[in-house]
Amino acid sequence: MARAGGITNAVNVGIAVQADWENREFISHISLNVRRLFDFLVQFEATTKSKLASLNEKLDLLEHRLELLEVQVGTASANPALFNT
């Protein structure tokens, strides 16, 4: 009878080991996917910041050009004689 109990314990240990390996594999997959997601988000943030900085530069340039045009229109409106040539 001791022999049957030993086999049962060995089977239980084998099942526990198998379950432990499956859990470790699952955790490994989750960890890998979390790492990939983190890498994607870091890259996305860097790309987004770069594109926003570029867009900000373009907007600054357009604002400067608009200010210049406003000054020119104001000057031309104040001096209508400039249009009579």
Image (cartoon, helix red, strand yellow):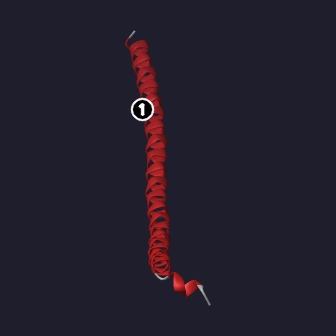
The image position of residue 8, as x and y in percent, is 43, 16
Q: To which residue does mark 1 refer?
A: 20
Residue drawn at (39%, 19%) of the image:
9
Residue drawn at (43%, 13%) of the image:
4
Residue type pointed to by label 1:
Asp
Residue neighbourhood size for the residue with mark 1, other residues' Cα within 10 Å, grouped as few (<14), some (14–19), many (≥20) = few
Nearer-the-camera pick, 25 or 47: 47
Nearer-the-camera pick, 68 or 48: 68
The image position of residue 71, as x and y in percent, is 44, 78
The image position of residue 27, as x and y in percent, is 43, 38
Please, is residue 61 above or below residue 14 in the view?
A: below
Nearer-the-camera pick, 81 or 34: 81
Residue drawn at (48%, 60%) of the image:
48
Name of the residue lying farthest toward the bottom: 85
Viewport quadrant of the C terminus: bottom right
Kindly state the secondary structure of the residue where label 1 is placed.
Answer: helix
The image position of residue 80, as x and y in percent, is 52, 81
Name of the residue lying farthest toward the right: 85
Viewport quadrant of the N terminus: top left
